[in-house]
Amino acid sequence: MKNLLVADFRRIFKGKGIYILMGLAFVFPALTALVMYLSGLVADLTEVGDLLIDFYNPLTFYSSSFNPTSNIGLVLLIVVTVVLSGEFTNNTIRNKIVAGHSKLNMFLSSLILVLTYVFVIMFIHSSSTYLFNSIIFGFGKSPFVEFLKRGLVAYSGVFVLYTALTLLTYHFKNLIGPLGIILGVYFVLMMVSTYMFVANEGEGLKAKFLFYLFPFLYLGGTAAPKNVEWLWATLTNISYLVVLPAFGLVLAKRTDYK
């Protein structure tokens, strides 16, 4: 397992792709903050007062930086799917079988690699978003503990999506199937959850019913976890992170790599 992980990480970090994404994860937030500053938005918000503070503040931008359909989010999703599916489309995964690695270890190695890859990019992107927006809007707008809560919900939600992506890639063994299902299911759930949230004016169980079932929907930015909802969301995501890999191991064991 150790040798397999080392080989997988060496393959990724020897390439240029991850470093390009790391650069983009830093540049995109910097450019966005610069455009907002040069456009005079900060001055306009100062005149308006607290009217738009719920929409334009470092905490909101930090939370939105995890959106899987944003600029870096979508690029990352596509790149990771290409990396994962490439093992099957190029049939290089057979080399691991020949080398004597077990199917279970191959799946676990792929999953660890994917989650590490995603964490590195999302950490740079979210941290840069927090930094640059705090510079132009001001530090201390929200307590740091709020960023910590949002971060726990967001990172665990992102990990759920990419764990599901890894599982689907081992099932379909191609690019289109896993990517299409992840985006399709996410968009459908987002549309339905947004409708329910707006229709119920964001109040009550009906408004956030789907968010309670699928906390990764908070990544879309339609709603935000309030009070102890962040804890429920994080624990629910963790439960998915237990069930999905277990199911993935069963699937990997039954997969034919011919």
Image (spheres, rainbow, N blue to C red):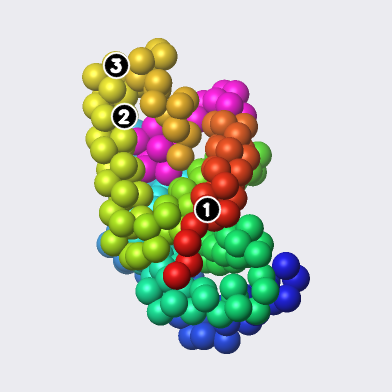
* Residue 174 image offset from top left, x and y in percent: 35, 65
Q: Dot 1: within a 10 Å radius of its alpha carbon, few (fewer than 14), some, or many (20 or more) residues?
A: few
As rendered, which of 198 and 254 lies closer to the eye? 254
| Residue furthest to the right | 2
Residue at numbered disc 3: 200
Q: Which of marks 3 and 2 is nearer the N terminus?
A: 2
Proximity of marks 2 and 1: CB atoms separated by less than 8 Å: no
Q: Dot 3: within a 10 Å radius of its alpha carbon, few (fewer than 14), some, or many (20 or more) residues?
A: some
Name the amino acid, label 2. Answer: Ser
Q: In which quarter of the image is the N terminus?
A: bottom right
From the viewer's perspective, is the residue at label 3 or at label 1 nearer? 1
Q: Can residue 247 be seen at all in this image of the molecule?
A: yes
- Range drawn in magenta: 217-232
Q: How far apart are marks 3 and 2 (CA)?
A: 11 Å
* Residue 136 image offset from top left, x and y in percent: 46, 58
Kindly state the secondary structure of the residue where label 2 is placed: helix
Q: Distance between the residues labelled 2 and 1?
A: 35 Å
Q: Distance between the residues labelled 3 and 1?
A: 45 Å
Q: In this view, does 148 lie to the left or right of 80?
A: right
From the viewer's perspective, is the residue at label 2 or at label 1 nearer? 1
* Residue 211 image offset from top left, x and y in percent: 42, 29
Q: Which mark is residue 193?
A: 2
As rendered, which of 214 and 63 lies closer to the eye? 214
From the viewer's perspective, is the residue at label 3 or at label 2 nearer? 2
Residue at numbered disc 1: 254
Proximity of marks 3 and 2: CB atoms separated by less than 8 Å: no
- Residue drawn at x 27%, y 46% as measured from the top left: 184
- Residue drawn at x 24%, y 19% as measured from the top left: 199
